[in-house]
Image (tube, rainbow, N blue to C red):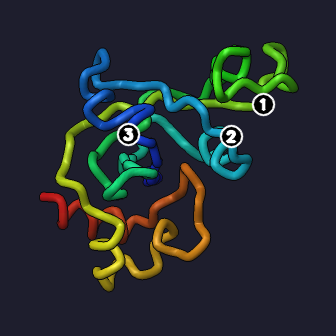
Amino acid sequence: MNYWLMKSEPDDVSVDDALAAPNATVPWTGVRGWQARNFMRNEMRVDDGVLFYHSSCAQPGIVGIARVASEPHPDPTQFDAKSPYYDPVSKPEKPRWVLVDVQVLRKTRNLTLSEMRSIPELADMLVLKKGNRLSVMPVEPQHWEAILKLLR
C-alpha cells in the first residue's frame, strides 16, 4: 500500500464537497503537472491512503483522510474547451491527463502546514520541503502513521 498527499483548493473541491458527493467520492480533476500525473498514472492503486489537503487558502493543511477509489482514467476536463483545465493538444484517442477518484473516509481537524513544520517526525516530509509545489505527492509510511496519531 502507498500513501499520498493530494492538494485541492477548497473553492474548487473541499473536503465537505467530497463528503457531500455520492459515496463521498470525487474525481480528482485538473492535475496538470507531469510528475503529479505520473504518480497517479503509474503508482497509485485502489485503497492507497490519501491525506486530503486544502491549499491556496488562509490555513493550508490536512483536513481529511481518504483513499484512492479507482484506477487511473482519462480526465474529461482536458477535452472540455470551457474548462480551465482544457488541453487542446490532448485527444480522446491519446489522452495526456488522468485522474483517480478519491473517497473521503473522514474529515479531520485542520493539521496546518505551520503545525506540521513544528513536528520533528515530519521534518523530511515532501510537502514541507522548500519549493515543493506538487499537487500530488507520495507520503512515507512513517509520516502517514505520525499524522494519523496526531489526528485521532
Pointer 1 and pointer 2: residues touching (CB < 8 Å)?
no
Mark sitting earlier along the chain (1/2): 2
Q: Disc 2 marks which amino acid?
A: Arg
Mark 3 surroundings: few (<14), some (14-19) or many (≥20) residues within 10 A: some
Mark 2 burial class by Cα count in 10 Å: few <14, some 14-19, many 20+: some
State the residue position of label 3. 10
Figure quadrant of residue 12: top left
**In the rendering, at what x and y percent does residue 27 appear?**
48, 25
Is residue 6 toward the left or the right of residue 73 in the image? left
Q: Quadrant of residue 84?
A: top right
Q: Which mark is residue 96?
A: 1
Q: Nearer the viewer, residue 127 or 81?
A: 81
Q: Which mark is residue 137?
A: none
Residue located 30% across and 37% down the image? 15
Q: CA distance from mark 3 to mark 1?
A: 25 Å
Judged from this view, the residue extending furthest toward the left is 152
Residue 69, position in %: x, y?
A: 42, 29
Identified by mark 3, the residue type is Pro
The local secondary structure at tag 2 comes to: loop
